[in-house]
Image: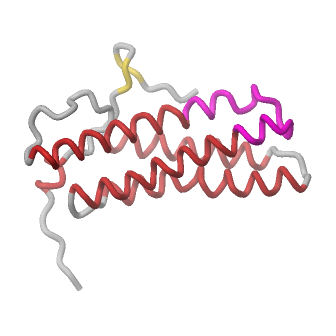
């Protein structure tokens, strides 16, 4: 449903990852709308909706970061929200509100987004510590690199 791999390994650029997190959010919306009308489903569903839709919004904010530390801080929010969305899906399934197989694909996608986000944070932190963009975790699947930050024109302050 969500896989976007080349040679068995996911490699994503900024635009592709934005689209992938948007598809994740839309799938979360569909899942929440299909939940049964009961108190527990409503509470857990609202939490899932909030966390699952904020993954893409916060990734977009990270793409607009003004410095590598700013990008890392915003990606940390993406990490937290993706992990939280997975948590709410697990609770929906484990509590019996919905069948576990209804969230398997979406949970797997959430886990992949989480793993790629963590890899990107690791890369950016490593590059920031090293002081340059060479040689640090070249396997990171999200290519929101420091080079792209350096190539942006300075933003004016209001």
Q: Quadrant of residue 126?
A: top left
**Residue drawn where x is 86% and y is 36% of the image:** 96
The correct choice, above or below, for 26 with respect to 158 in the image is above
Q: Residue 70: x and y, percent?
A: 28, 61
Q: Quadrant of residue 58?
A: bottom left
Q: Residue 28: x and y, percent?
A: 65, 45
Q: Residue 101: x and y, percent?
A: 75, 25
Secondary structure mainly formed by the magenta segment: helix
**Residue drawn where x is 58% and y is 27% of the image:** 1
Q: Residue 46: x and y, percent?
A: 73, 57
The quarter of the rendered structure image containing the C terminus is bottom left
Residue at the far top in the pictured view? 7
Q: How many marks?
A: 0
Q: Quadrant of residue 139?
A: top left
What's drawn in magenta, residue-wise?
90-109
Check residue 103 for magenta coloring. yes
Check residue 4 for magenta coloring. no
Residue at the far right in the pictured view? 38
Residue 150 is left or right of residue 13, and the answer is: left
**Residue drawn where x is 67% and y is 28% of the image:** 104
Give the colour scheme shown.
secondary structure
**Residue drawn where x is 51% and y is 47% of the image:** 22
Residue at the far bottom in the pictured view? 158
């Amino acid at each position: 449903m969500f896989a976007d791999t080349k040679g068995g390994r996911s490699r994503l650029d900024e635009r592709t990852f934005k689209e992938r997190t948007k598809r994740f959010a839309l799938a979360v919306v569909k899942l929440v709308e299909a939940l049964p009308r009961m108190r527990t489903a409503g509470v857990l569903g609202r939490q899932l909706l909030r966390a699952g839709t904020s993954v893409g919004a916060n990734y977009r904010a990270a793409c607009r970061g003004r410095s590598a530390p700013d990008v890392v801080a915003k990606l940390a929010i993406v990490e937290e929200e993706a992990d939280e969305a997975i948590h709410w899906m697990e609770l929906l399934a484990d509590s019996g509100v919905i069948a576990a197989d209804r969230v398997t694909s979406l949970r797997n996608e959430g886990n992949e987004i989480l793993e790629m986000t963590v890899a990107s944070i690791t890369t950016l932190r490593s590059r920031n510590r090293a002081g340059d963009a060479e040689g640090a975790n070249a396997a990171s699947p999200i290519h929101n690199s420091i080079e792209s930050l350096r190539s942006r024109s300075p933003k004016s302050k209001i």
